[in-house]
Image (spheres, rainbow, N blue to C red):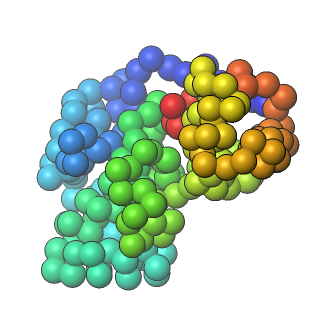
Amino acid sequence: MTLTHTPSVYPGMIDKGIEFFAVEGKMKFIADSKIQCTTNLPFGIIQLAKEQINTEPEVAAALKEWHPTSEFNQVNQFLKCRYGGLDFSADFIDNQFKSGDYWDCPSRGSCPFNGTLCKAPVYNGHELSALEIKLMKLTASSLTNETIALDLKIPFGSFHKHKQALYEKLAVQTKQEVALIAKSLNLI
């Protein structure tokens, strides 16, 4: 398990990176040490976002269905779904968008484009399922295994099988290691 020290400064505050994030349903970004609305995004970044969208036909189709008359709303929705979490890793740097952030979107699971626009977290080359994400969040808490199984609405024996499979996927042995990984993936 390799974890790096998390800096205490967000991208865009002291470097040339840009950090996008959703707050109260609105998209903002940090660049040049300022928090701004995405309506102030430079034209070049909007163009690069459109290019990124067009490299993924399913994403482009979903955005056109969601916002058929506004390219800006399509870009804004893309940024929200793909990069809505505030974290310490730049979403845009060196004229390139990174692959995406996991963030706890209130529409996750009920959105018609779930999994198309947003990205599931990946660790050690393995994409994490919705159940694994919930299990990681709950395991990182102070709850007992019995309480976690009840919260997940699964029998206790099944809980242990899911937990064992998750620990193998993450290559860990303790709840503390799961918590560190969950924090590094912006899950907690």
Picture coordinates of residue 47 (x, y %)?
30, 65
Q: Is there any visible trace of residue 9 in the rendered image?
A: yes
Is residue 168 shown above or below 44? above
Q: Residue at x 36, y 57 (%)?
A: 107
Picture coordinates of residue 70 (x, y %)?
17, 74
Asked whether 55 or 158 is in front, the reply is: 158
Asked whether 175 or 62 is in front, the reply is: 175
Is residue 176 shown above or below 11? above
Q: Is there any visible trace of residue 51 in the rendered image?
A: no
Picture coordinates of residue 63 (x, y %)?
32, 74
User: Quadrant of the image for the N terminus?
Assistant: top right
Asked whether 146 or 177 is in front, the reply is: 146
Is residue 109 shown above or below 13? below
User: In screen coordinates, is 9 left or right of 98?
Assistant: left
Q: Residue at x 20, y 66 (%)?
A: 73
Report which quarter residue 130 is drawn in: bottom right
User: In screen coordinates, is 55 left or right of 73?
Assistant: right
Asked whether 38 or 164 is in front, the reply is: 164
Q: Residue at x 29, y 44 (%)?
A: 22
User: In screen coordinates, is 165 left or right of 104?
Assistant: right
Is residue 9 shown above or below 1? above
Picture coordinates of residue 76 (x, y %)?
26, 59
Q: How many marks?
A: 0
Report which quarter residue 62 is drawn in: bottom left
Q: Residue at x 38, y 50 (%)?
A: 105
